[in-house]
Image (spheres, grey):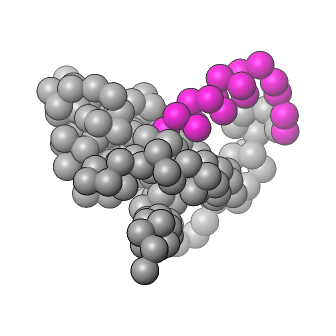
Amino acid sequence: MNPEHVTQSEVVDLIPALRAFARTFCPKPEEADDLVQETLTKALAHIDLFEPGTRLKSWMFTIMRNTFCTRFKRRGRETVGLPDGIADRLSVEPNQDWIMQADDVRRALYRLPHHHREMLILIVMLGERYEDAAEICGCKIGTVKSRLNRARRQLRRELGETSAN
């Protein structure tokens, strides 16, 4: 079997993890799916640049993170769609307690600074190792640990589970 095909199938196997990671950047599922699609397109177009022996997942996450950062910079120069926050006021809150709790957690998560939310998602939700998260985010392991600790503490405060001290 051609090694390129093996790598392409490994890329396809990472789609669920890519979708989960994309949700750390994009609260709307359709935007997250667009980010995943763009990441896959870039990765497959440049699969020859992937270095065998390194982690494909980290390489893909780095592509996604860089793609998002580029989009974010570009988006700052243009305004499209509804103003921020208006869509939340147009929706009806759900009746079920568990849905409301999930919404509370989601909103609290998105109130975290981006770099804290990113660490929480990478390590807690996606199960990445500290070393891989550091590589993906381009920082040191100590920075990863401190961001994760701050993210956990702030998320608990946001959810009213601990005192604000």
Residue 155 in sight here: no
Q: Residue furthest bottom?
A: 1
Main secondary structure type of the part rendered in magenta: helix
Foreground residue among 137 and 96: 137
The image quarter in which residue 159 lies:
top left
Q: Is 19 left or right of 163, judged from the image as shown? A: right
Residue 142 painted magenta: no
Question: Which residue is located at x 61 percent, y 52 percent?
Answer: 45
- Identify the image quadrant of residue 112: top left
Quadrant the N terminus occupies: bottom left
Q: Position of residue 67 (x, y in %)?
A: 58, 38
Q: Is residue 43 above or below residue 79?
A: below
Q: Which residues are magenta?
A: 65-81
The residue drawn where x is 35% and y is 48% is 51
Whether residue 60 sits left or right of residue 155 in the image: it is right
Residue placed most toward the observer, 106 or 130: 130
From the viewer's perspective, tell me whether residue 111 is left or right of residue 30.
left
Location of residue 9 with respect to 78 vertically, above or below: below
Quadrant that contains the C terminus: top left
Nearest the camera: 96 or 82? 82
Q: Is residue 80 magenta?
A: yes
Q: Which of 62/21 is in front?
A: 62
Farthest front residue in view = 2
Say how many tags the image has. Answer: 0
Classify residue 105 as left or right of residue 127.
right
Residue 131 showing in the rendered view: yes
Q: Residue at x 17, y 31 (%)?
A: 141
Q: Is residue 125 above or below residue 46?
A: below
Residue 55 drawn at (x, y percent): 30, 53
Q: Residue at x 60, y 66 (%)?
A: 94
Residue 107, x across and y down, in percent: 50, 45
The percent coordinates of residue 118 (x first, y second) are 39, 39
